[in-house]
């Protein structure tokens, strides 16, 4: 081995490296983005849980039992006076849990039979189980303070069943408070029901974006597009000829996922099959349009694959709500996650599979997906021109 020749070859490779911006992008920018995004933006902690607190008992004792939520970073309480209002908040996904203090809470507490009701949104079992644990711990701490006579948020811990009198003369020995916990939309209380709809989103992203991210670039690299350019075909015809076959392949993959979810993993389908199919058609068009746009712009299979990985698959796994609760991430990351079409498809599929037909979620998310589909299909038509650059 000649050190002189080796040095010359190393110098040549360094020159090529400095002249290829994509190498620096892949080797430096992507790792830096991922480490800062995951390190600062991702959190497995469940915080700021929007909770509807139904105070049917307005006594100081009833108010003090839920006072642990007011300054807690784990809750964002919203006080209402009826279960109907609380259910509406949950249907609109403005509440992940309902904590109900019944009208006879103070009276039953004085008899040693205090009870509160907790209802969690079981579509996301991680948030539901964390909420149950937080509430049980908070009420346990309140009960300990109540029994010891410590004031809670300025409210005397031992209070009578009437808000106008105290028990200074004849104190009543309070009993325990039990939490009656229920979980809606996930009777089995299994994370599989939550993860399978999310897994369908990832599979559709993988199939839709990666298949088409390579197709135009491959044609450019092989020179076969030049043969098409000399024909009377329009650019739009070339694009749609690429879209239709891959759309069919992606939808076959979707049906495989759907049948597996229902009959292999026994995930219930509470919503409309037609709406699930309609939303999936929209998202597949979004993914195919994104892949064609990337492929037409870069005209290189390797770069197209890398960019597709960066802008589609990784964000879908990390930023769409599949793993992390988006309310627990920083505001900037939350904003970025809501710029991604996968976030809306994820929310839509989970709701349709487990919660049923929620008009608020269906109309909003389907409209957003339709806009993204039009945007990316339009971009793919715009960047595809019958000319050699």
Image (cartoon, grey):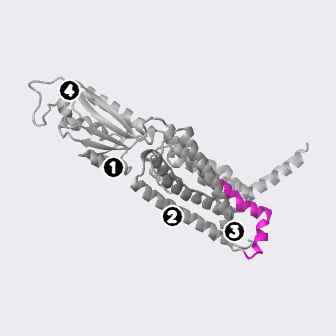
Instruction: Farthest residue to the left: give it.
Output: 169
Q: Residue 267 placed where, x, y %?
A: 50, 41
Q: Is residue 94 visible?
A: no
Query: Could you tell me how far apart the alpha carbons at marks 3 and 4 are, in whole angstroms?
Result: 78 Å
In space, the residues marked 1 and 2 are separated at their CA atoms by: 26 Å
- Sequence-wise, the earlier of marks 4 and 2 is 4
Q: Nearer the viewer, residue 5 or 130?
A: 130
Instruction: Identify the image quadrant of residue 138.
Output: top left
Q: x and y percent of residue 97 in the render?
A: 35, 42
The earlier-in-sequence mark between 3 and 4 is 4
SS at badge 1: helix
Neighbour tally class for label 2: few under 14, some 14-19, many 20 plus, Cα within 10 Å? some
Which residue was labeled with disc 4?
A: 149
Q: Real-space Cα distance between discs 1 and 3? A: 47 Å
Q: In the figure, residue 297 lies in which quadrant?
A: bottom right
> Which numbered marker is on residue 371?
2
Q: Quadrant of residue 55?
A: top left
Measure the alpha-carbon separation of dots 3 and 2. 22 Å
* Gap between marks 4 and 1 measured at Cα: 35 Å
Please rate how many residues cluster around mark 1, counting C-alpha atoms within 10 Å: few if below 14, some from 14 to 19, many from 20.
many
User: Where does the N terminus fall, quadrant-wise?
Assistant: top right
Depth-wise, is mark 3 or mark 2 nearer the camera? 3
* Image: magenta residue range: 210-232
Query: 129 above or below 21?
Result: above
* Image: 283 above or below 182: below
Mark 3 = which residue?
Answer: 238
> Does the stretch in magenta take in 11?
no
- Mark 1, residue position: 89
Q: Which mark is residue 243?
A: none
């Amino acid at each position: 081995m000649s050190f002189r020749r080796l040095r010359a070859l190393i110098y040549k490779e360094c020159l090529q490296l400095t002249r290829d911006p994509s190498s620096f992008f892949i080797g430096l920018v992507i790792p830096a983005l991922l480490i800062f995004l995951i390190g600062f933006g991702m959190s497995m902690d469940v915080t700021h849980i929007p909770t509807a607190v139904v105070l049917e008992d307005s006594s100081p004792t009833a108010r003090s039992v839920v006072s642990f939520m007011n300054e807690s970073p784990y809750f964002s309480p919203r006080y209402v006076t009826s279960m109907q209002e609380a259910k509406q908040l949950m249907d609109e996904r403005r509440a992940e849990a309902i904590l109900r203090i019944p009208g006879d809470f103070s009276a039953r507490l004085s008899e040693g039979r205090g009870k509160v009701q907790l209802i969690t949104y079981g579509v996301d079992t991680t948030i539901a189980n964390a909420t149950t644990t937080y509430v049980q711990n908070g009420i346990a701490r309140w009960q300990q303070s109540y029994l010891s006579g410590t004031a809670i948020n300025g409210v005397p811990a031992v209070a009578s069943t009437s808000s106008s009198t105290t028990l200074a003369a004849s104190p009543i020995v309070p009993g325990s408070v039990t939490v009656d916990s229920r979980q809606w939309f996930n009777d089995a209380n299994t994370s599989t029901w939550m993860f399978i709809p999310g897994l369908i989103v990832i599979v559709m992203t993988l199939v839709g974006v990666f298949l088409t991210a390579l197709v135009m670039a491959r044609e450019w690299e092989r020179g076969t597009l030049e043969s098409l350019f000399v024909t009377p075909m329009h650019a739009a015809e070339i694009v749609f000829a690429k879209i239709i076959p891959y759309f069919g392949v992606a939808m076959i993959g979707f049906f495989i996922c759907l049948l597996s979810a229902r009959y292999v993993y026994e995930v219930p389908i509470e919503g409309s099959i037609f709406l699930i199919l309609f939303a999936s058609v929209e998202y597949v068009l979004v993914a195919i349009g994104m892949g064609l746009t990337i492929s037409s712009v870069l005209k290189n299979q390797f770069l197209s694959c890398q960019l597709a990985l960066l802008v589609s698959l990784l964000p879908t796994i990390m930023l769409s709500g599949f793993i992390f609760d988006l309310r627990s991430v920083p505001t900037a990351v939350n904003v970025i996650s809501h710029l991604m079409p996968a976030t809306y498809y994820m929310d839509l599929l989970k709701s349709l599979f487990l919660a049923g037909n929620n008009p608020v979620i269906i109309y909003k998310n389907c409209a957003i997906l339709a806009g993204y589909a039009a945007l990316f299909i339009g971009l793919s038509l715009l960047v595809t021109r019958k000319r050699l650059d």
